Image (cartoon, helix red, strand yellow):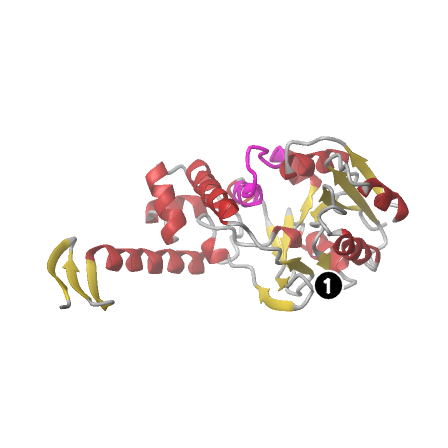
Amino acid sequence: MSPLVSIITVTKNLIDAGRSDWFRQCVESVRMQDYPNIEHLIIDGASTDGSQKLFQELGLKYISEQDSGVYNAFNKGIRLAQGKYIAFLNSDDFYTRSDAVTLSVNALEKNKADFSYAPYDLVSLNGNVIGTIQPNWKTCFTAQPIGHPTMFCTKQMLEGLNGFDETFKIAGDFDLITRALLQGKTTVCVKETIVSFRNTGISSRQKDILIKENIRVIETNCKVSHAQAVRAQKNGFLPAKTLTFLISKTVDFPDKAAVFKYNLKNFLKFVRRRFITLRLRKGKRCFRFLGITFYNEEKK
C-alpha cells in the first residue's frame, strides 16, 4: 500500500482577504493528484469571516482555533498529520501537475531520503508564469536554497527537529532547512517543476523582518558572531573555516563545489568593494585602495 501523505494548508480569513478563489485552486490541485493516499489538513487561525463554511462546502478536514502565527499552525498540522510524509502547501499556491505527489514520494522511497525538493514556478496574481525558480544550493547557509512548498518531509524528521521554531515570523522555513542539513538529514531532488508559488508581494516592513530573521538563522545555526552573520546575509559569504565545518556536518550535500565557489566569489567581490574603489559617476571622482582614499574630487 502507498504510504499516506499529509498535505497541510494554513489559512486565516480567506474570504475577507479576497483569496477564496485561490484557495479553491489550491484544494483542487490536491484533489487532482493521481497519488492514491492523501489527507489534506486545513489549519485555520480562528477565521471570523465565514471561512469555515467554505471548508465545509468543499468537504475538507479542518480545525479552526487561535494560533500565534504560521509556524505555530504548521506545528499543529505536524502533530495532527497521520502520514509518513508531510508537505506544506500555502493557500495561495497550487500543484501544477497531477503527479506532483507521486514523483515526490517515489523519489523519497527510492532514495530513503528525509526530504525532497523541486523547482517551482513563480506566478502572478492571475496565475501567469513569471519564471521558474531552480533549487540554489550555492546560497546555502546564507540564504534559503529551496522553495518550502516543493518539500515533502518525513514526519519522523520534522518531529526529530521539534518542528518549526515558532519565534520566527517569516524565516522559519530557512531555519528548518538549515537545521535539517546540519543534523545530517538526507535530500533528494525531484527535477520536474511541481508547484506554482503565487507572488503576492512583500512589504518593506516584512523585508526588514526577513533580513533580521535571516541574520538570526545564520548566527544561531552557523555559530558565528552577529557581525559575521550580518555580513553573510548582506554579502553572501561565510569564513572559509566556518563553511568547511558546516559542510562536514551534512550528508550527501547536493553541490559542495558550487557553495565553495559561490562563497569565494562573494568574498572577493566584498574585498574589491571594501578596499579597492574606483568611481566616476554622478560628477564624483574617487579612488580608494586598502581603505585609503588617494583621490576624491567633485567635478566643477
93 and 206: which is toward the camera: 206
The residue indicated by pointer 1 is 96
Q: Position of residue 222 (x, y in %)?
A: 42, 40
148 and 273: which is toward the camera: 273
Q: In the rendered structure, does residue 131 fall within the stretch colored magenta?
A: no
Magenta segment range? 160-179
Q: Does any portion of residue 103 appear in the rendered image?
A: no
Identified at 50% across, 56% down, the residue is: 137
Q: Amino acid at mark 1?
A: Thr
Residue 280 position by quadrant: bottom left
Q: Position of residue 243 (x, y in %)?
A: 39, 47
Left or right for 103, reference 32: left
Determine crowd level at label 1: few under 14, some 14-19, many 20+ residues with C-alpha closer than 10 A: some
Q: Position of residue 253 (x, y in %)?
A: 51, 53
Q: Secondary structure at mark 1?
A: loop
Q: Does any portion of residue 51 appear in the rendered image?
A: yes
In which quadrant is the C terminus drawn?
Answer: bottom left
Identified at 71% across, 34% down, the residue is: 76
Asked if residue 38 is positioned above or below residue 102 in the image, the reply reads above
